[in-house]
Image (cartoon, rainbow, N blue to C red):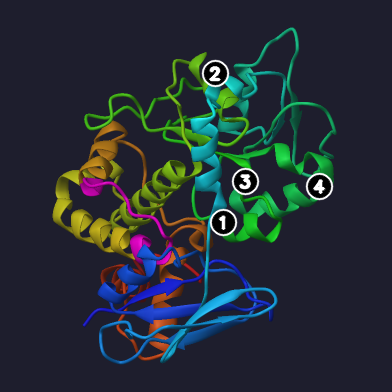
Amino acid sequence: RRFCIASQGSMNDSGSTEIVIAPPATAATIGACGFIGGLTTKTTRLSWLCSKHRVCSAFRSRQSAQNKRLVTRGLCMQVSSDSRTLIEYMNYLEGGGDENLPRDQPAVIVGGGRIGSLLASLGDPESPDVIVRRGEPIPNRDGPIYVCTRNDDLEAVIEATPEEKRKDLVFLQNGMLDPLLRKFTLMDNSRVNVYFAVAKLGAKPIDGRTSTNPEGLTAATGVWSQAVAERLAKAELSCRVLQSRDFQRSMFEKLIWISAVMLIGSVHGNIPVGQVAEKHADELEELVDELARMVRFTARTALLGGVPERISAYCRAVPDFPTALKEFQWRNGFFYQYSMLARKNNFDDPTPMHTNYLEEGKERGLIDWSA
């Protein structure tokens, strides 16, 4: 019997996060109540569901000074509520929308690589952007701050940003950023899910338009999302402006793409992504489905149907893109941490294929990674 791990996203008054490992049906029940959240930092305390694959019919509620919990035999978990969805809906009813978001304007761009240089080239030459290199101070000026660095540099960038300007940080990285953003209380910041590719510095970008999504896959959310979309449009790049819940789906789908495709391509000799979709289609579909189920039970995010088809279509759109296992902590490590929690407590691995490819591939010397 496969068990899935459902985790609660906010910390309790003791500074710990309560995790529940549950059968899929039970985890789905918990998810319907809005309990499932992302894994946070500090001490992890595991709470086990009752041994039978059902939630006890009798719940008793207990109120404390700081939180409200639902307690059942073997289950102790905080109530988690994400207010952003409700706020977005109320704004929609009141007529608030993209037209109220700030437009493209001079910005600070952190990082002068392929993405940072592209954004700078699309700015207004009469009011140029400020490009900040590694280690340089981030100026306190009006406008967005586009963060175009590697994931491992993000914490240093945040700490180097004046406190009053951190709300204007716009993150353009792949991978699971939520734990870091929670640490600095930046979960409401603008983010961009990049689906366009820049082969080399100064090269023309290739848009992420596919047979399943001809409108394009790149997406942005947050207060600076419209500004991002307008700037990318100058290079004829698509960018959808999404509310936070829809953006979460987009972000997780990209996380699954980069984790599954890069892993399969790497164990097969670092073949390009087009060959992954063409020669290993069955492997890709099975691994994508496995990771998508995991996302549903751990992150309160149910992806739209047809994930394997969309991921294969994107592989065909950028067929020569190379595969490599990089930034493990931010990509495959998100799934692997749950596998290790299950193993430690004698539960079935929720993503066995993913774990097997990682561990056996490393043992055979096909890939190298460190958790």
In terms of sequence position, does the residue under pointer 4 or pointer 2 come before the other? 4
Which numbered circle lies on residue 178? 1
Q: Position of residue 5 (x, y in %)?
A: 39, 75
Mark with earlier residue (3, 2)? 3
Image position of 260 with respect to 195: above or below: below
Residue under label 4, please give it: 160
Crowd class of label 3 (few under 14; some 14 to 19; many from 20; radius 10 Å): some
| Residue plotted at (56% across, 19% down) | 99
Q: Secondary structure at mark 2?
A: helix
Mark nearer the viewer, 3 or 1:
3
In percent of the image, x 63 and y 76: which residue is there? 12
Q: Which residue is mark 2?
A: 230
Residue range in magenta is 295-308
N-terminal of the pair, mark 3 or mark 4, is: 4
Which callout, 3 or 2, points to the residue nearer the camera?
A: 3
Are the two marked residues, 4 and 2, in contact with CB atoms closer than 8 angstroms?
no
Q: Is residue 136 left or right of residue 44?
A: right
Q: Which residue is mark 3?
A: 188
Nearest the eye: 257 or 320: 257
- Mark 1 or mark 4: whose residue is earlier in sequence: 4
Element type at marker 3?
Answer: loop
Between disc 3 and disc 4, the foreground one is: 3
**Residue 123 percent coordinates (x, y):** 65, 16
